[in-house]
Amino acid sequence: MSILRHGDEKFHYSDGSHKWIPPDSDYDQEVWDEQVRQHKQCHLKNERPKIRIQRLV
């Protein structure tokens, strides 16, 4: 099960995997990589989720 909070959509594909390609070709790749890394760290923290989605296999 994945936890998706409001605003997380920009970091995820519809299957729940993380986007490592910036949303815009002018976006700095290193900046995007760091934002995704920080976003993934939030998944590891025990923060209270606002929305839960379940991936069907």
Image (cartoon, rainbow, N blue to C red):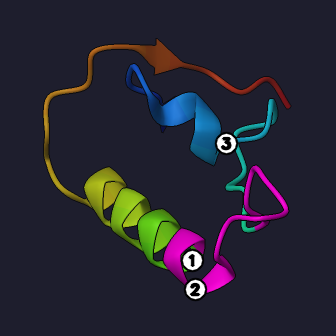
- 10 Å crowding of disc 3: few (<14), some (14-19), many (20+): some
Callout 2 crowding tier (Cα within 10 Å): few <14, some 14–19, many ≥20: few
Residue 6 relative to residue 47: left or right:
right
- Residue at mark 2: 30
Q: Residues within 10 Å of mark 1 (few under 14, many from 20)?
A: some
Callout 1–callout 3 Cβ contact below 8 Å: no
Image coordinates for residue 7, horizontal then vertical, percent: 44, 27
The residue nearer to you, when weighing 21 against 12, is 21
- Mark 2 vs mark 1, CA separation in Å: 5 Å
Describe the element under mark 2 as helix, strand or loop. Answer: helix
In the depicted structure, whether residue 33 falls above or below residue 48: below
The answer to whether residue 40 is visible is yes
Whether residue 50 is situated above or below residue 38 in the rendered picture: above
Cβ–Cβ under 8 Å for marks 2 and 1: yes
Question: In the rendered structure, which amino acid carries the disc numbered 3?
Answer: His
Q: Nearer the viewer, mark 1 or mark 3?
A: 1
- Prevailing secondary structure class for the magenta stretch in the rendered image: loop
Residue at x 45%, y 77% (from the top left corner): 34
Q: Is residue 23 above or below residue 3?
A: below
Quarter of the view holding residue 10 = top right
What residue sits right under mark 3 in the picture? Answer: 12
The residue that appears at 85% across and 32% down in the rendered structure is 57
Q: Amino acid at mark 1?
A: Asp
Question: Residue at the location (14% across, 47% down)?
Answer: 46
Q: Is residue 23 magenta?
A: yes
Residue 29, quarter of picture = bottom right
Give the amino acid type for the residue marked by disc 2 in the picture.
Glu
Residue that badge 1 annotates: 33
User: How far apart are the alpha carbons under marks 2 and 3?
Assistant: 18 Å
> Where are the magenta residues, as a range?
21-32
